[in-house]
Image (cartoon, rainbow, N blue to C red):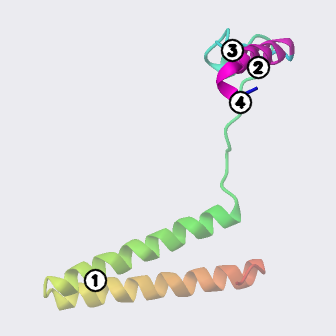
Amino acid sequence: MTTAMRQGTGQQRLGTAMKSNASAGFKSKPQNPDPRQTAGAKPIEEKKEKSEEENFKDLEEEVHRLLEESARHKVDRQLTEALTKAKEAASKEKKIRQLRENAGTLD
């Protein structure tokens, strides 16, 4: 028997799969589109404070931004401003290193 002779088997399997999902409790369309507004669920509390690692990441992003600005000023031949931004980035990098040493999370 060739595959061309077996018509409809794909449809039968698809129908079975859909029934098994429905019996497992899954629905094709959610009853409530916003899962945060379910009845009886507690509202999600937002973080009040950042963790140390998040603070370090923010400081590192600031250093990166300063270095990008320094490079941009150098390309524009504003060498004094480029040097100022580079020095500021270096001092912030030292500050990050000191904070990481004090926290014991130095890479």
Instruction: Look at 71% across and 19% down and name the residue there.
Output: 6
Q: Which mark is residue 89?
A: none
Q: Are marks 2 and 1 in contact (CB under 8 Å)?
A: no
Density class for disc 2 (Cα within 10 Å; few <14, some 14-19, many ≥20) is: few
Magenta stretch, residue numbers: 3-23
Label 4 and label 2: CA atoms lie apart by: 40 Å
Q: Which residue is mark 3?
A: 8
Density class for disc 1 (Cα within 10 Å; few <14, some 14-19, many ≥20) is: some
Assign a secondary structure to mark 1: helix
Give, as a three-letter code, the residue at label 2. Answer: Arg
Q: Position of residue 93 (x, y in %)?
A: 52, 84
Which of pointers 4 and 2 indicates the residue nearer the eye?
2
Q: Is residue 52 left or right of residue 40?
A: left
Splitting the image into 4 quarters, where does residue 103 fall?
A: bottom right
Q: Are marks 4 and 1 in contact (CB under 8 Å)?
A: no
Density class for disc 3 (Cα within 10 Å; few <14, some 14-19, many ≥20) is: few
Label 3 and label 1: CA atoms lie apart by: 65 Å
Q: Is residue 20 left or right of residue 29?
A: right
Q: Which mark is residue 71?
A: 1
Which of the two labelled residues, at mark 3 and mark 2, occupies the earlier sequence position?
Answer: 3
Assign a secondary structure to mark 4: loop
Q: Which residue is mark 2?
A: 13
Give, as a three-letter code, the residue at label 3. Answer: Gly
Q: Is residue 13 left or right of residue 97?
A: right
Label 4 and label 3: CA atoms lie apart by: 47 Å
Which of the two labelled residues, at mark 4 and mark 1, occupies the earlier sequence position?
Answer: 4
Which of the two labelled residues, at mark 2 and mark 1, occupies the earlier sequence position?
Answer: 2
Which of pointers 4 and 3 indicates the residue nearer the eye?
3
Magenta residue check for 49: no
Q: Residue furthest right?
A: 24
